[in-house]
Amino acid sequence: MKNILFTGYYFDGYHGSMIHICEIADYLSKKGFSCYCASVSITDEIKEYAKTKGLNVFSASDGSLLSRTYDYVWAYHFPILGYLLHNGLKYRKIHIGSLSSFVAIERPVLFYDECALFSVVSEETKENLVKEYGVKQDKIYLLKNLLPDAYPSYHIDNKVKQSLPKKIAVISNHPPKELTELKEFLPNTEITYYGSKSDNYQPITPELISKYDVIISIGKTVQYALGMGIPVYNYDYLGGSGYITLKNIDEEEYFNFSGRSHCRKITSEEIANEILNGYEKAVQESEKLKRLAVDRYLLSKNIDNIIKLLDGKEDTKLTTDVDYKLFMAYSTAFINEVLFLHNNIKQSAENFKNLEHKNTELIKEYENYKSYFHLPKPLVLFLSCFIPKRKNRRHFRKIHTMPSKSLKIACIMCVKNEERYLPTFLKHVEKYVDSILVVDDGSTDSTVQILEQHPLVKEVCKLPVHTVKEWDENKNRRKLIELAQKHKIDWVLCCDPDERFELNFLKNIRKLIKSAHNERLCYHLHFRELWDSPMTYRCDGIWDKKEKGILFPLSQHEDHSYSSHLHIPWFSKDITIHKQIDYNIYHLKMIKKEEREKRKNLYKFLDPKNEMQSIGYDYLTDTENLKLRTIPKNKKYDVKKLPSFLIDNGS
């Protein structure tokens, strides 16, 4: 009988990493392995769940973990490994795994290549680790998200063929608004929500998803549904590409079915239309996709390969150099602090749980400290020591430790022939940003001259004059981000001259950044189309649901790759948290009827077959269900900073 020790930070909920470890343990325990896990954040409920999978979970500080020698240590969330090594962990072989390239505790340590195996969950993660952290490509083993054998072998009764789905499951711990409001646009379909923010927070099983005609989800659940021959609509808080098909599965798999392939955000109505219109084809492809999923992701086959690989490797012998000792020391300091907070603050919170006012500051503090990312000390100390590509250490330390008051904010924008809107826009933002960076896409009016005369405009990248059809939004936005990186900007505010921000948002920009400067977060605002007057905006149907991600931190190393869609997001795939905040952006170019017509005709010219926006562009001038709302006083923008032709002629 062999002993195997897993490490995993989160055993306090049905998280992807916890499920991943339990699935592997379930399989190995049935093959005769004794499976253990060292964790930091543990709840009794999840500990009992792990037991049903043959996995015994202990606090990393439990001395009994060190009483045996492990044939294999399967380490995720590396600070725990350093803590155990420091305390005398006995092992034969170490396998380090990374389930993401964008989360700090998933990053590799300096001695990854001294371990028996280093595995990653996707090609995207592999490429990022090679490019950003200098990990040797030939040292990386690809272990994709796994499909437990119970899924493809689960018997589903032959359903009566139907042209439309009757039951849909939305499986997400962070469903965006466009999914939570989906029922409104699918009145004849039963939709059930599963996840931490729903009434159905439970493990996903073959029995559960077999009831549904379509699964809407990302990540591991995609493999589950594919392996059962159930159509999967890939969409969540980052957006998504829609149905997984034989045509797009390779691209979506590359991004671990995360929605990051294009970060395409669409409305609830558009999602509903795609689900209904694409259902028949998705059903037709489901059996072929099932066979493909079994071939690629089946757990038994993949884990047997891993064990065979480990058996063929020499025992792990870690070099005890300075970096290794620092790793153990800082990891130990970190884990000790985490354990102290979890044990003591939790106990204190328990003592207060019967108080009338349950949301005490202490309980709030505990809830914050449950998250790894709310522990800045000694987090930065040890993380900055173990990035393999050492030239990136300074960059990493800067991103995570720079005091918020010193962060540089730049307004960035692409412009073309904006002389009517530009002067007042510059006055609108000049008090709230440190600099302004611009890509001019071939203006033939006085746009460039206006920009060059403003003291905050640090650089204008001037592109040659061209036709509308030669316009390349993707290329322009990449140039603009590169410009911001060149000027060592920390946070960017994405702007257009024909937009105005709510004053309260501008006044609070520094506070928003201060509260999030340790996170890879993008703030999203409500996007309001002003209509017939500078003081009213349209609010019927999809008009009330528009949003725009416009404020986020900028890494000096991240690569910004965009899709071919119109109005693609500015942020890169490195942005992992998206937060909708209750502020407005007001769009000026929809105020006048003639401007609306001009806008519709432009997009129809650029996209005549509606390939970039399935609902087309006629809605831009459609007034059939027109509803207007007056801007409330607490949501106002500076009307004095409007172009004179809008103030004089307004409606």
Image (tube, rainbow, N blue to C red):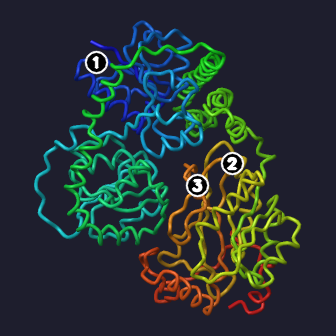
Q: Secondary structure at mark 2?
A: loop
Q: Position of residue 260 (x, y in %)?
A: 48, 54
Q: Secondary structure at mark 3?
A: loop
In this view, the residue farthest toward the front is: 138
Ranked by sequence position, the earlier of labels 1 and 3 is: 1
Tag 1: residue type? Phe
Q: Quadrant of the C terminus?
A: bottom right
Give the residue pinned by disc 1: 33
In this view, the residue farthest toward the top is: 67
Label 3 crowd bin: few (<14), some (14–19), many (20+), radius 10 Å: many
Give the residue pinned by disc 3: 572
Q: Residue at x 80, y 60 (%)?
A: 433
Are the residues tagged 3 and 2 within 8 Å (C-beta)?
A: no
Ranked by sequence position, the earlier of labels 3 and 2 is: 2
Ranked by sequence position, the earlier of labels 2 and 1 is: 1
Give the residue pinned by disc 2: 556
Left/right of residue 2 with respect to residue 588 in the rendered view: left
Q: Position of residue 493 (x, y in %)?
A: 70, 61
Residue 99 sits above or below residue 520 on the image: above
Figure quadrant of residue 458 = bottom right
Tag 2: residue type? Gln
